[in-house]
Image: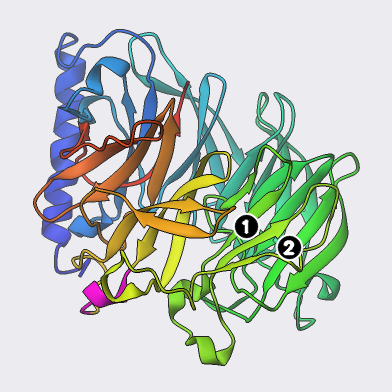
């Protein structure tokens, strides 16, 4: 599909370049005031291009406008972003192993002001970034089984944590494939894919526990009830009780449950470093009456709100013809971890390429690519239950990720 639509992608790229050039020649074109409230990581691969964009969005644009390519920075496809204070960090995932930093400007633009080469292997897989302070952050290099520790202020690497060891792999192959990370009580919990053949993972859910003070891996835990712990953009959250909830996406549901793979949510209770044997919210075997056909193939792209309520996308096999780009198979869901319930939201269905959910105040922002309601950010109010029927912000491509500045 990418080759077939290459001309379209080239046209889009050329148009974007023209917009940027025109903006430089016409300083008043697309002028805004105030720093970006959001930064969209848009992926144009669905249109046949290998291009992505980081697009700053100011608060006044969140009123049914369109994200402006005139202020965009061109990046590779599959972009992910993380934010810290006035910075947004770009993780190029599979494309290269350089982490890029951008600073928000008062005129609504972004300026690249730092970078760090994290590996000589361009395909190392920069999938997740966990920032603890102005001087310490972790980046998982999923495909080469390392975690890089760096100073996000100076963009200098301070340490590498090598996880390519037999004791950190279920079968002794030394390939845990670290992905999402979360910090709690002096420990960094690292979800592992344990890949068999991407995106298919080996059976089971696996987490490595690292002592943050010394950056020493000290424990490798597993649970056979679910598979594929965490995701590229994290999927691990600490609730108000101090419990960690972990999304398990079970190889996107490609492996039948009878072969040992189930998706859902596991828990590590506060004060513990093992999976809670009394908790498993089983999605694969669940029956959900408000879902077409009652079944979900997998759930992912989680965003935690509060009090055990999270939001996610859920793939419904009843809508699938096998075209994961054009089929609108994914519900926007409200998930209650405590009561183990799932409720579809009054938002249009989206495709399997959509993966962005973020929180801005009480608004939960969903990046949707819909059949007739447009492409962009839709909102659902966590308090009132009000949902937008059209994008509150139109986007030029699929929204892969969003950095939100409160």
Dot label at residue 176: none
Q: Nearer the viewer, residue 151 or 401?
A: 401
Around disc 1, counting alpha carbons within 10 Å, would you say few (fewer than 14), some (14 to 19), or many (20 or more)?
A: many
Provide the residue span drawn in magenta. 316-321
Image marks 1 and 2: residues in contact by CB distance under 8 Å: yes
Residue in the picture at 24% in, 48% down: 347
Q: Which residue is mark 2?
A: 207
Q: Image quadrant for the N terminus?
A: bottom left
Residue in the picture at 23% in, 30% down: 67
Residue in the picture at 53% in, 73% down: 250
Please tell me whether residue 351 is drawn above or below residue 338 in the rendered image: below
Q: Nearer the viewer, residue 390 or 160?
A: 390
Residue 109 percent coordinates (x, y): 34, 19
Residue 145 percent coordinates (x, y): 70, 63
Residue 146 horizontal side relative to residue 6, left or right: right
Q: Which residue is mark 1?
A: 246
Locate residue 136: give its quadrant.
top right
Residue 318 highlighted magenta (yes or no): yes
Residue 240 horizontal side relative to residue 388, left or right: right
Residue 388 highlighted magenta (yes or no): no
- Earlier in the chain: of badge 1 and badge 2, it is 2
Please tell me whether residue 51 is drawn above or below residue 281 in the rendered image: above
Residue 164 percent coordinates (x, y): 77, 68
């Amino acid at each position: 599909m990418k080759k077939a639509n290459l001309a379209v992608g080239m046209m889009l790229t050329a148009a974007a370049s023209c917009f940027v050039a025109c903006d430089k020649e016409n300083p008043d074109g697309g002028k805004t005031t105030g720093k970006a409230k959001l930064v969209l990581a848009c992926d144009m691969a669905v249109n046949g291009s290998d291009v992505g964009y980081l697009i700053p969005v100011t608060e006044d644009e969140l009123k049914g406008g369109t994200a402006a390519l005139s202020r965009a920075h061109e990046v590779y496809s599959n972009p992910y972003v993380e934010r810290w204070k006035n910075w947004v960090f770009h993780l190029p995932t599979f494309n290269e192993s350089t982490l890029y930093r951008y600073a928000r400007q008062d005129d609504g633009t972004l300026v690249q002001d730092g970078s760090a080469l994290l590996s000589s292997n361009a395909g190392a897989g920069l999938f997740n970034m966990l920032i603890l302070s102005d001087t310490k952050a972790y980046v998982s290099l999923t495909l080469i089984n390392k975690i890089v520790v760096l100073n996000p202020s100076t963009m200098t690497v301070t340490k590498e944590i090598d996880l390519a060891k037999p004791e950190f792999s279920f079968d002794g192959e030394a390939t845990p494939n670290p992905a999402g990370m979360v910090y709690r009580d002096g420990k960094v919990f690292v979800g592992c894919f344990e890949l068999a053949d991407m995106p298919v993972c080996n059976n089971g859910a696996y987490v490595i526990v690292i002592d943050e003070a010394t950056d020493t891996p000290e424990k490798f835990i597993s649970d056979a009830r679910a598979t594929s712990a965490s995701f590229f953009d994290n999927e691990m959250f600490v609730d108000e009780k101090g419990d960690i909830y972990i999304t398990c996406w079970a190889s996107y549901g490609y492996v039948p449950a009878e072969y040992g793979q189930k998706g859902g949510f596991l828990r590590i209770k506060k004060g513990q470093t093992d999976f809670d044997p009394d908790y498993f919210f089983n999605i694969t075997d669940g029956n959900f009456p408000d879902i077409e056909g009652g079944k979900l193939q997998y759930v992912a792209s989680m965003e935690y709100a509060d009090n055990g309520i999270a939001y996610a996308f859920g793939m419904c096999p009843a809508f699938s013809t096998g075209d994961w780009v054009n089929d609108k198979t994914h519900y926007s869901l409200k998930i209650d971890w405590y009561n183990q319930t799932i409720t579809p939201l009054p938002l249009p269905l989206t495709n399997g390429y959509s993966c962005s959910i973020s929180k801005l105040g009480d608004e939960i922002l969903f990046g949707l690519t819909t059949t007739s309601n447009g492409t962009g950010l839709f909102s659902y109010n966590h308090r009132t239950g009000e949902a937008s029927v059209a994008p509150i912000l139109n986007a030029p491509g699929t929204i892969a990720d969003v950095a939100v500045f409160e």
